[in-house]
């Protein structure tokens, strides 16, 4: 793939027009069009501005790519996942989970994952299915997986959740209050210190981070990806240690650590 093809692909991925690129760079849209047709190449200062605009490295624009791969925003059908979780809840008499699934679907209705057309409900369903695939069938844990973002993102109060107090406590612990950049470090320290006291909250939070790491390449800016890597390396080994020290979560601890650290290494090599 040529420089022009890279520019066109990055522009289209972000839903931008040639005119919008031209306005941002202070040039004509004909100049942008000529780059994309490989008639001319942008000057160095324009390459740097394009990289800032697309939130990518300069090499992502200049490097010729000889192989292109199709990527998937979603691996599974969310409605099939919903059916699986509800069926499991019925078979194992998981009452909290049964009501949590429908409550989460309604609460997240109309929401999408960042920079994606995928319904947001795909994310909590991923957590629930991930846990179930590791033979974790604790009602409050699976219900908390489904509800973990409802209070934080949907304007729902904790006391309004249709689940028992233990499930609400897990959701409370993994709900992070919004804060300024200046407050972030202090908020994170207090947030993870509280989660660390509850193995079930540690489990839900590690499942949450696993799924977020798998989708952040198309959902987050490079700065946010860098911040996610640093935060994961700083706080999650402690959560994994809690899981490892909890006999029923020992196997899950191994898998979750393997999944997170593998993804972190891949991101580091590609950034």
Image (cartoon, rainbow, N blue to C red):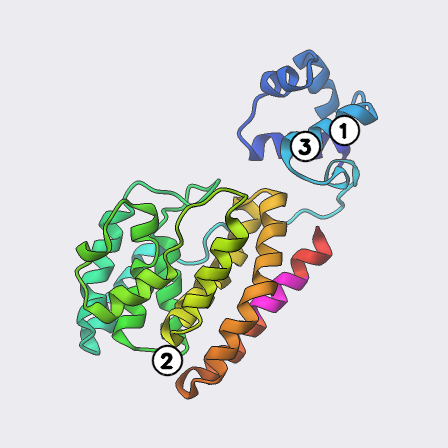
How far is the residue under mark 1 from the one under mark 3? 9 Å
Q: Which mark is residue 214?
A: none
How busy is the neighbourhood of tag 2: few (under 14 within 10 Å), some, or many (20 plus)?
Answer: few
Q: Nearer the viewer, residue 271 or 223?
A: 223
- Please tell me whether mark 2 sits on a helix, a strand or a loop: loop
Residue 164 lies in quadrant: bottom left
Is residue 262 rendered magenta in the image?
A: yes
| 33 on left or right of 249 | right
**Nearer the N terminus, badge 3 or badge 2?**
3
Q: Position of residue 246 (x, y in %)?
A: 43, 84
Give the magenta range. Answer: 259-265
Q: Position of residue 13 (x, y in %)?
A: 57, 35
Q: Are marks 2 and 1 in contact (CB under 8 Å)?
A: no
Q: Which residue is mark 1?
A: 47
For the point 37% across and 80% down, the residue is 135
Q: Nearer the viewer, residue 53 or 30?
A: 53
For the point 46% across and 43% down, the residue is 114
Q: Are marks 3 and 2 in contact (CB under 8 Å)?
A: no
| 159 on left or right of 58 | left
């Amino acid at each position: 793939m040529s420089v022009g093809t890279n520019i066109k692909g990055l522009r289209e991925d972000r839903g931008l027009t040639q005119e919008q690129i031209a306005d941002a760079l202070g040039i004509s849209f004909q100049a942008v069009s000529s780059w994309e047709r490989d008639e001319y190449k942008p000057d160095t200062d324009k390459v740097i501005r394009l990289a800032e605009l697309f939130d990518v490295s300069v090499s992502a624009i200049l490097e010729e790519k000889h192989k292109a791969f199709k990527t998937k925003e979603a691996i599974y059908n969310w409605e099939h996942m919903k059916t699986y979780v509800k069926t499991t809840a019925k078979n194992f008499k998981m009452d909290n989970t049964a009501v949590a699934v429908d409550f989460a679907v309604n609460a997240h209705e109309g929401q999408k994952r960042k920079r994606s057309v995928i319904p947001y409900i795909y994310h909590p369903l991923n957590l629930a299915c991930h846990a179930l695939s590791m033979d974790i069938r604790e009602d409050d844990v699976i219900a908390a997986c489904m509800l973990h973002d409802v209070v934080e993102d949907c304007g729902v109060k904790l006391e309004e959740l249709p689940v028992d107090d233990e499930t609400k406590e897990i959701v409370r612990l993994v709900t992070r209050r919004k804060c300024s950049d200046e407050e972030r470090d202090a908020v994170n320290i207090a947030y993870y210190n509280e989660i660390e006291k509850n193995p079930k909250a540690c489990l839900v939070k590690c499942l949450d981070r696993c799924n977020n790491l798998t989708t952040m390449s198309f959902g987050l800016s490079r700065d946010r990806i860098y911040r996610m890597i640093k935060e994961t390396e700083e706080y999650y080994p402690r959560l994994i240690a809690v899981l490892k020290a909890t006999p029923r979560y020992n196997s899950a601890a191994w898998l979750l650590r393997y999944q997170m650290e593998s993804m972190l290494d891949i991101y580091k090599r590609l950034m």
